[in-house]
Each structure stands twice: as structure tokens, then as C-alpha cells.
């Protein structure tokens, strides 16, 4: 069974990255000569911003997400693929999709062969200290995200804004991607200030949700959000829960649409569409008319 995000995944990241990255590329070196993943709130010395870890954790979490989603994709006859390019919907080599459900293993895809897009906004959540003694190294957990000065994952405003911007860019690139669900996959809660935004994004159809796959982001299982009222944000506590949510999302056709029309024009479109025989045909007629 697949494992959701845990502290063990972060240990795996650091141990894997230490095979080719220096301690200084992965950790802050404090005035006290200690290596920290994040500056502890109790730390009083000089601080700096660490950028070298970003691409490493980004690639690691994308590969983790592919692995997490691959079994579900395979059951549908699809593949979970990292770094997909599809110019029809604004996914370029400079800004590819992090993970995609698609028809083949190819990185370059047609929009018609893409079934879902997952933008991965994860990072290390807990704080870690690297202890070095001669050739031996040990990772010690110093506490959850409330004990350090960093804002990991979906708690970062820039991560949220990038995810929102990517979703909007896909939606405004044309009608090719109007049926493709877009999920932002994280491993932290969101801040209260972003609750109205994620709700509106889901209700407007721009994205289909901000999902966290970290069931216990706080060591004492402290108060952290499970879901927002309209499910713009949702935290998964088990792998089975994730599969159930994917089924709800993927097994029914949806269509994104947006427009700015006069009420008179909207009324005319609704009246014409309503002449069709079935709900599905009414919807198809409405979407065709509103896009003319």
C-alpha cells in the first residue's frame, strides 16, 4: 500500500540528497555550528535564506507524487508522468505540468490525451538537525512547522500564488483543457487567509482543490484544518481516502467554462439550450453557444 507523507519521507529525502549534495546545500549552518533544515524559533543568531534545496525537494516530491498516483492511473489504463509539456494548454518546457494522468508515458502530450493535472507544492515540513561525527551522520527531528521560522508547502504565499497562476494560465490557454481537472497537491495545511480564495477557485472551476497528503502535520496532532466548507482544501488521512476522492473527481465528466455576458445574451443562450432533449445535450449546446 502507498504511504502518505510522513517524517520518514523527509528522512528519505535528506539521506538520498546527501549522496550528491553538501550539508550546506541542504541545511542552514548556524552561528552555533549546528546544521538546521529551518531556523528554529528559539534561534537568536544570524540568518540567511537557503535556495539550493528548492530544486532538490521539488524533484523529490514530484517523483513521490508520481509514485503515489501511479497505481490509480494504471487501474484506469493511464500513466502518471512527471514534467509533461502540452503547448495547447500553456504547458511549456520552461513551465511543464508537475504530474499528469495521461494516455502514454511520453512527456510531450496532446490535450486530448491528458486526463488530470497535479501541481505539486510540497517541501520539508518538520525541522531537522544534521549531527555529524567523523563519517557518521544522524538526523534528529527538532519539531513540526510551528516550532521553526519557515513556511513550508501550502503555507507559503508564493507557493499558493504560483499554483493559482499556473491553474489560470492553463484555463485561459484555450478550450482544449476545459475538461481537465487541476489539483494542487501539498503536504501542509493552508493559512486562514487563503480559505476564501481556494473556495472561490474550486467553485469557479479554475482548480478542483488544494489537497494535502500529510495526515499528521503536527507532532501533537494539534488543531489543523481537515477541509474547508466547499472542499477547496482537503487533507487526506489515509491512502484509501485519496483513492475515493480521485474516483469522485475522475469518473464523471466535467467541463470548465467562463464568460462575461449581458443578462439578455445569457437568457437567449439558456432559452436555446433548453430546447434540447437531455441534460447532457442542453449542457453541450449551452457551452457551444457561450464560446461563440
Image: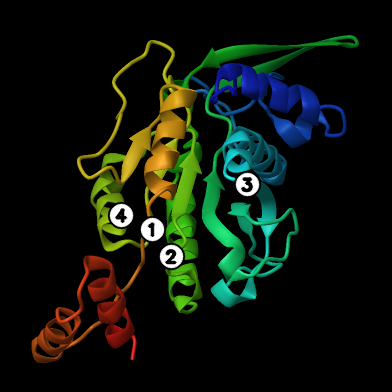
In which quarter of the view is residue 49 placed?
A: top right
Q: Quadrant of the N terminus?
A: top right
Please state which of the two labelled residues, at mark 4 or mark 3, is closer to the viewer. Answer: 3
Residues at marks 2 and 1, CA–CA distance in whole angstroms: 7 Å
Q: Is residue 155 at all visible to an observer of this figure?
A: no
Q: Which residue is mark 3?
A: 77
Mark 4 is surrounded, within 10 Å at the Cα level, by few (under 14), some (14 to 19) or many (20 or more) other residues, namely some
Q: Which mark is residue 253?
A: 1
* Badge 2 vs badge 1, beta-carbon distance below 8 Å: yes
Number of numbered discs on residues? 4
> From the viewer's perspective, is residue 274 above or below residue 233?
below
Task: Determine the residue positioned at 70% across, 46% down.
Answer: 55
Nearest to N terminus: mark 4 or mark 3: 3
Sequence-wise first label, 2 or 4: 2
Q: What is the C-alpha distance between the residues marked 2 and 4?
A: 14 Å
Q: Earlier in the sequence, mark 4 or mark 1?
A: 4
Q: Which residue is mark 2?
A: 179
Q: Nearer the viewer, mark 2 or mark 3?
A: 3
Point out the tag, 2 or 3, that comes first from the N-terminus.
3
Label 2 vs label 4, nearer the camera = 2
- Indicate the secondary structure of the residue bearing disc 1: loop
Mark 4 falls on what kind of element?
helix
Instruction: Calculate the distance from the C-alpha at mark 4 to the C-alpha at mark 1.
Output: 16 Å
Image position of 28 with respect to 153: above or below: above
* Residue pointed to by mark 4: 202
Observer-nearest of 69 and 145: 69
SS of the residue under disc 3: loop
The C terminus - image quarter: bottom left
Amino acid at each position: 500500500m502507498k504511504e502518505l507523507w510522513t517524517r520518514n519521507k523527509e528522512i528519505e529525502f535528506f539521506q538520498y540528497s546527501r549522496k550528491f549534495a553538501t550539508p550546506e546545500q541542504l541545511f542552514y549552518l548556524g552561528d552555533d555550528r549546528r546544521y538546521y533544515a529551518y531556523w528554529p524559533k528559539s534561534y537568536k543568531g544570524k540568518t540567511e535564506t537557503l535556495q539550493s534545496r528548492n530544486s532538490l525537494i521539488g524533484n523529490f516530491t514530484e517523483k513521490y507524487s508520481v509514485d503515489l498516483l501511479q497505481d490509480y492511473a494504471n487501474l484506469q489504463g493511464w500513466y502518471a508522468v512527471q514534467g509533461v509539456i502540452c503547448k495547447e494548454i500553456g504547458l511549456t518546457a520552461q513551465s511543464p505540468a508537475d504530474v499528469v494522468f495521461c494516455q502514454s508515458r511520453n512527456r510531450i502530450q496532446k490535450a486530448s490525451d491528458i486526463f488530470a493535472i497535479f501541481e505539486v507544492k510540497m517541501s520539508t515540513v518538520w525541522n531537522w538537525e544534521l549531527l555529524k561525527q567523523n563519517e557518521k551522520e544522524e538526523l534528529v527531528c527538532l519539531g513540526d512547522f510551528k516550532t521553526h521560522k519557515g513556511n513550508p508547502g501550502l503555507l507559503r504565499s508564493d507557493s499558493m500564488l504560483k499554483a493559482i497562476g499556473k491553474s489560470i494560465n492553463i484555463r485561459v490557454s484555450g478550450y482544449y483543457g476545459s475538461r481537465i481537472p487541476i489539483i494542487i497537491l501539498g503536504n501542509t495545511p493552508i493559512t486562514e487567509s487563503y480559505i476564501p480564495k481556494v473556495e472561490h477557485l474550486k467553485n469557479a472551476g479554475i482548480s478542483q482543490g488544494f489537497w494535502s497528503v500529510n495526515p499528521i502535520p503536527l507532532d501533537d496532532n494539534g488543531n489543523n484544518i481537515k477541509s474547508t466548507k466547499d472542499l477547496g482544501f482537503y487533507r487526506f488521512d489515509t491512502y484509501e481516502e485519496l483513492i475515493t476522492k480521485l474516483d469522485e473527481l475522475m469518473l464523471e465528466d466535467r467541463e470548465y467554462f467562463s464568460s462575461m455576458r449581458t443578462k439578455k445574451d445569457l437568457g437567449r443562450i439558456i432559452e436555446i439550450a433548453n430546447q434540447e432533449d437531455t441534460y447532457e445535450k442542453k449542457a453541450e449546446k449551452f457551452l457551444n453557444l457561450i464560446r461563440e
